[in-house]
Amino acid sequence: MPRPTTVTYRVFANPADVARAAAELFASTIAKAASARGVARVAISGGTTPKAMFALLASEPFVGQVPWDKLDLYWVDERCVAPEDAESNYRMTRETLLSKVPLPADRIHRMEGELEPEVAAARYEAAIRNGFKLEGAQTPTFDLVLLGMGDDGHTASLFPHTEALNDMTHIVVANHVPQKDTWRITLTWPVINQGREVAFLIEGDKKAEVLHEVFQGKYQPETYPSQIIRPASGKLTLLLDAAAAAKLPEPANGTGTLELK
């Protein structure tokens, strides 16, 4: 049975405002985690939506608000390409953020997309276990997991009707995506759900229908993998522009809630 979850969705006029809200969430969450535990561990997504957020984080006032020396940065997923490839999530992040902020190189933990998928997944799982000092079957707890959502309802590299949806034991897996005829490396959904703060960044009118189906339609996570994201905290955040939110209930003062049973 899916876990009951309170979804808080914040709707902004345009993508630029979504990016600013995401940058504020990133900076404040890292500062709080670093203050509370001495380290902040964050898993980010690639794609086009986070680019504007990364650009803001690389400029004032955000660059001065983030305790970069206490941040360990991980990725939610990666394409199976070299780090210099135009499709690489790591490359996009390096160009828009990492090359412009004082984040120590040894605190940047990229997925090695240039390796064989199974090898890359195993190495990344080992890196996470070592970084979090996990024992046995322990699940890592990220302070913040930032997600996107595809037009087909996928998130991370958890695509509809793919094998990774059935994996509840690994931290990282290689996932074959037949509909794209490719392999991806991804965190598994139990790991995403363990995050202290889990947020989707979603923009554009092409996402309106799938957003409605994911959060107000029938529970069918094989078809809409984003439905399986039900954090252990019982709370999920959506940062949306008005176009993406068009088919959700009109929020009061820009913020609405949905109760998922």
Image (cartoon, rainbow, N blue to C red):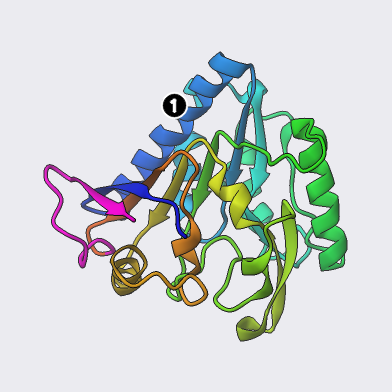
Of 31 and 51, nearer the camera is 31
What is the quadrant of the C terminus in the image?
A: bottom left
Residue picked out by circle 1: 28
In the picture provided, is 10 more to the left or to the right than 77?
left
| x, y percent for residue 171 | 72, 51
Q: Is residue 88 above or below residue 9?
A: below
Seen at 17% across and 45% down, the residue is: 254
Q: Amino acid at mark 1?
A: Ser
- Relative to 92, does residue 176 appear above or below in the rendering? below
In which image quadrant can residue 74 be found?
A: top right
Residue 60 in view of the camera:
no
Label 1 residue SS: helix
Quarter residue 36 falls in: top right
Would residue 254 be counted in the magenta stretch? yes
Q: Main secondary structure of the magenta part?
A: loop
Residue 139 lies in the magenta-colored region? no
- Left or right: 196 as drawn, with respect to 6: right
Q: Give the magenta part as a residue range.
A: 244-261
Q: Is residue 212 left or right of residue 199?
A: left
Q: Residues within 10 Å of mark 1 (few under 14, many from 20)?
A: some
